[in-house]
Image (cartoon, helix red, strand yellow):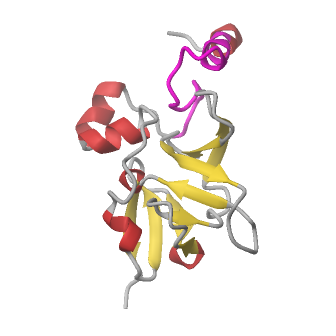
Amino acid sequence: MRRTKRNFLGAMAAAFAGGASASAPARSYEIDHSSADWRRRLSSEQFRVLRRGGTEPPFASPLLKERRDGTYACAGCGLPLFSSATKFDSGTGWPSFWKPDDGAVAMHADATGHMRNEVHCRRCGGHLGHVFDDGPKPTGLRYCMNGAALEFRPDEA
């Protein structure tokens, strides 16, 4: 299907009317696979979170307890997203960060009716989580991420 302004506006209207999932809006991304290809590349949980806008249960991700220095990257495309230096224990049950890497994420209004902003990977559009304004200094932001949307790359010793 050809992407047009009318198609985009129609999709956005449907999303804000409550008829769409919380997944990334129809946009053009540097990495753009078919749904079938994403299913082959990702685990079922990664697909549900990254491509369908799902949320994993709190305290389910092993990345919640990850304490090593390193980088958290998009599990869909490998783009570095967060430094371990910006990770903090928010007590929410999801890996949380106070700042993403420059230019790594895109923000979109949540289409579910909740007062929050979705965070997506800038390169593949994968749904990562949400950002809230109750985080620590220096930003005051809490990037609440799904561990299934991330892969951890430890720094080399």
Question: What residue sits 59% from the left and 46% below the top?
Answer: 119
Above-or-below relation of 146 to 14 = below
Above-or-below relation of 129 to 1 = below
Between 135 and 73, the residue placed more toward the observer is 135
Question: What residue sits 70% from the left and 61% below the top?
Answer: 134
The dominant secondary structure in magenta is loop
Question: What residue sits 50% from the left and 67% below the top?
Answer: 91
Q: Is residue 75 left or right of residue 106?
A: left
Above-or-below relation of 94 to 127 = below
Q: Bounds of the magenta span?
A: 10-30
Q: Is residue 75 left or right of residue 131?
A: left
Q: Is residue 18 left or right of residue 78?
A: right
Q: Is residue 19 left or right of residue 17?
A: left
Between 30 and 45, the residue placed more toward the observer is 45
Place of residue 96 in the rendered image (x, y in percent of width and height, measured from the top left): 53, 64
> Which quadrant of the rendered structure holds the C terminus?
bottom left
Question: What residue sits 42% from the left and 31% below the top?
Answer: 52
Place of residue 85 in the rendered image (x, y in percent of width and height, measured from the top left): 57, 79
- Image quarter of residue 27: top right
Which residue is at the far bottom? 157
Check if residue 46 falls in the magenta segment: no
Check if residue 25 falls in the magenta segment: yes
- Image quarter of residue 47: top left
Between 27 and 58, the residue placed more toward the observer is 58
